[in-house]
């Protein structure tokens, strides 16, 4: 059978009460240690027994040792701040101080901006002017590096586009060269003479087609309409 539920009430037997207090105290301290280690929390535990004996625990870390006194001081400080926020007058004073701090920070930023723009430098010493000059040089160096990076990226993109266009031109040249060979074969079949073939080849060269030696060089094709040849047939064939 499982363990029965314990009724939460005062234990009348003093011996049982002391045993229960000892067990629960050790368990509570153990849970506090686990909470401090697992969650990196600052934990303080204060226990007084029925006889008035004090038991306390303060969390520790690898860098600092948190004592019970520092925990209590921090607790009192946070409690006072919370009480001040709950008080309307204290809350108004708190926000007035915050507004004054922000206003001072804004004035400092404006003054630094004016000095960076070369204005109101009369209050600066030689050391201040040197620091301002170094800051401007560092800022200018950062701007130049960013500019060079953008230009480098643009040049790389343009080079990639140029390579693609060059490849397209090479493919177009191969297609035009193939058409040229087919046409030359047709002329050769029709006329059967090398003069006509040579003439037709010269015609194709005048149309803007390059030779195979320059096939790998980017070309600019200018296609034009071929000249219309008039073929005269002999009277004998006509008859």
Image (cartoon, rainbow, N blue to C red):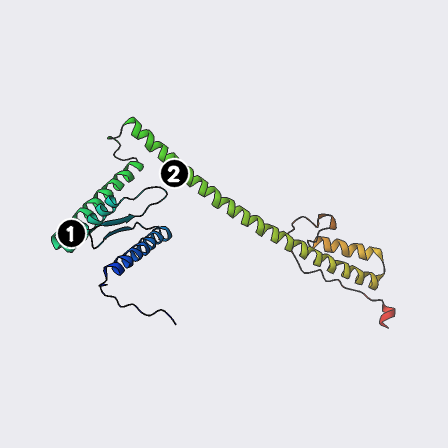
Closer to the chain start, of discs 1 and 2, is 1
Q: How many marks?
A: 2
Q: Residue 176 vs residue 112: left or right?
A: right
Q: Secondary structure at mark 1?
A: helix
Mark 1 Cα shell of 10 Å, populated few (<14), some (14-19), many (≥20): some
- Identity of the residue drawn at 45% across and 43% down: 147
Expressed as whole percent of the image width and height from the top left, the position of residue 236 reads: 88, 69
Q: CA distance from mark 1 to mark 2?
A: 44 Å
Q: Residues within 10 Å of mark 2 (few under 14, many from 20)?
A: few
Outermost residue on the top side: it is: 126
Comparing 64 with 110, the one in front is 64
Quadrant of residue 134 in the image?
top left
Specify the quadrant of the image occupied by residue 231.
bottom right
x and y percentages locating residue 23 in the rendered image: 31, 57
Q: Nearer the viewer, mark 1 or mark 2?
A: 1
| Image coords of residue 84 (percent x, y) | 15, 52
Instruction: Identify whether 177 is placed above or below 136.
Output: below
Residue at 33% x, 31% y is 131
Q: Residue 139, which numbered label?
A: 2
């Amino acid at each position: 059978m499982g363990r029965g539920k314990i009724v939460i009430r005062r234990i009348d037997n003093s011996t049982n009460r002391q045993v229960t207090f000892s067990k629960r105290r050790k368990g509570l301290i153990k849970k506090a240690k686990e909470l401090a280690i697992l969650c990196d929390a600052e934990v303080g535990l204060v226990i007084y027994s029925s006889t008035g004996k004090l038991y306390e625990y303060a969390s520790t870390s690898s860098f600092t040792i948190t004592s019970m006194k520092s925990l209590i001081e921090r607790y009192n400080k946070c409690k006072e701040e919370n009480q001040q926020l709950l008080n309307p007058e204290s809350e108004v004073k708190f926000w007035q101080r915050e507004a004054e701090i922000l206003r001072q920070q804004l004035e400092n930023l404006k003054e630094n901006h004016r000095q960076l723009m070369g204005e109101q430098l009369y209050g600066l010493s030689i050391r201040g002017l040197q620091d301002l000059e170094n800051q401007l040089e560092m800022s200018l160096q950062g701007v130049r590096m960013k500019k060079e990076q953008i230009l480098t990226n643009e040049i790389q993109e343009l080079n990639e586009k140029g390579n693609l266009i060059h490849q397209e031109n090479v493919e177009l040249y191969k297609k035009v060269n193939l058409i040229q060979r087919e046409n030359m074969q047709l002329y050769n079949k029709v006329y059967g003479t090398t003069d006509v073939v040579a003439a037709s080849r010269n015609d194709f060269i005048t149309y803007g087609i390059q030779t195979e030696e320059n096939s790998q060089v980017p070309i600019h094709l200018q296609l034009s309409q071929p000249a219309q040849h008039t073929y005269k047939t002999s009277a004998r064939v006509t008859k």
